[in-house]
Amino acid sequence: MAIQKRTSTNVLLDTALRNFYAAAEEMRLDEGLVEILSHSERRTCVSIPVEMDDGSVKVFDGYRVQHSTALGPSKGGIRFHPDVCLDECEALAMMMTWKCSLAGIPYGGGKGGVSFNPLDYSQKERERLTRTFAARIEPVVGTWTDVPAPDVNTGGPEMIWFMDTISKMRNQLEPAIFTGKPISLWGSKGRTAATGLGVATCAMEVLKVSGKPVEGATVAIQGFGNVGTYAALTMVKAGAKVVAISDITGAYYCPAGLDIQKCFDFVSSHPKKLLEGYQQEGMQKLAGEDLLFLPVDVLLPCALEGAINGKNADKVQAKFIIEGANGPVTPEGDEILDKKGTLVVPDFLANSGGVIGSYFEWCQNLGGFFWSEEEYNDRLLRIMRDNFHRVWDYSTANGVKMRRAAFMVAIKRVADAVRMRGVFL
Ligand code: NAD
């Protein structure tokens, strides 16, 4: 009996489902497993009444979706944004299941959020909203059930409000329910650089397996924010030559190589954390998008989704693209790159350093014992290299692109767990 495939009017959820069904079909995944994994275990909707500073009361909509806990507690961020809705949370939760599985960590996938624009509210209003949301989702989150983290418009302060509220409700400190906490309060050293370090590790491994030396390899990086800066610093430390970087103010190109430490210091002291005004001998300024088309060995899109698409992918000259951002290459762009022979390392492998770092924070919280930054980075590098090679080996052995290979490796690990644990999870 053929299964009834789920579809959605939400583009993100529909895409997540289509990607899953396509990989499942190619793997010849058992129909029962396809049914189970195309549905989320739990989709929670809550209302969040909040007293405004002027004494009035507003009610907000909040969500938490746990797609799968087959491998372990579900893991995924909490987003504060006007576009947040149940279907978007479900799509992102499903992607977290594959990301955590591929990362080889003992987590399933979850995601949540509240539909509102935090910029429209005072800090006190945001704190009351966060604490009430925490209280409403308290029955479904926990160290061994679901471990949320920061996402768009949430960070250290929100994680502390969440942790503090639930700790008070349970009358015991619960540091391991939320990751992404400040270092001074159960957070972990190394997290800031983790995603960029992981992206750079994938770039170095892809060069090595392709027989190209890292030393002297030329690199262009779109986006000089959290992911881009640490990827750049790591590549330079390994001997590569970062010739171009960009941010919302444009692209900065120096064929002889940029002084990345100087760029980093410049941005760190810039009031808006931008490259605007950066100068270096032999450097020229380009329009932002032109960075994507430079003659470099490696391109790291670390800014935004959809940067390389059906309209511009034919102009890309880089041989290797490592997706630091989420979804920087569209399916249409992917097809063009594939025909040109460009190798693309997919986002949920390349930028998984962040979630692996969250797992490290959880481990340290459970043990009540903190690691040094060196220990954190050593473990991260080892895991990222192993993960890269697991996907690379699968891709070459089965003749499939890295993106499809990554999906298949990730789905297989979850499917095996469901099979071993049985249907009645
Ligand atoms: P960030 O806000 O720190 O940096 C984003 C950078 O991109 C900024 O320098 C910004 O100026 C630049 N940018 C924005 N639009 C641009 C454009 N059109 N052209 C060139 N540059 C542009 O964000 P981040 O944390 O570095 O995240 C970047 C991407 O990586 C996002 O897609 C995010 O979802 C993804 N990601 C981040 C992490 C993490 O740990 N930070 C983990 C996984 C995935």
Image (cartoon, rainbow, N blue to C red):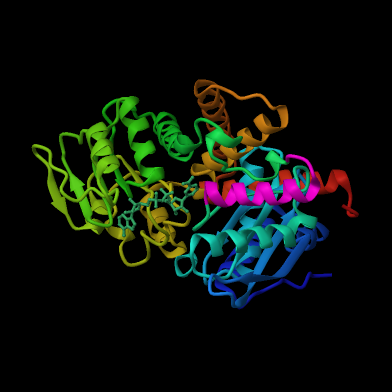
69, 327: nearer the viewer? 69
Quadrant (top left, top right, bottom left, bottom right) of the N terminus: bottom right
Q: Is residue 12 above or below residue 274?
A: below
- Give left or right: position of 28 versus 199: right
What is the residue that sits farthest to the front in this orientation? 55
113, 242: nearer the viewer? 113
Magenta residue span: 155-173
Q: Is residue 159 above or below residue 307?
A: above
Which residue does the image show at 66% across and 64% down from the upper left? 90
Residue 294 on image: x %, y %:
23, 48
The magenta stretch spans residue 311: no
- Give left or right: position of 172 versus 157: right
| Residue 425 shows up from this direction | yes
The magenta stretch spans residue 168: yes
- Give left or right: position of 284 versus 237: left
User: Can you tell which quarter of the image residue 295 is in?
Assistant: top left
| Residue 321 shows up from this direction | no
10, 151: nearer the viewer? 151
Examine the residues drawn in magenta and state their main secondary structure. Answer: helix
User: Can you tell which quarter of the image residue 91 is in?
Assistant: bottom right
Residue 57 on image: x %, y %:
62, 76
Residue 230 on image: x %, y %:
38, 37
Q: How many marks?
A: 0
Q: Is residue 41 above or below residue 52?
A: above
Which residue does the image show at 69% across and 27% down from the upper left? 368
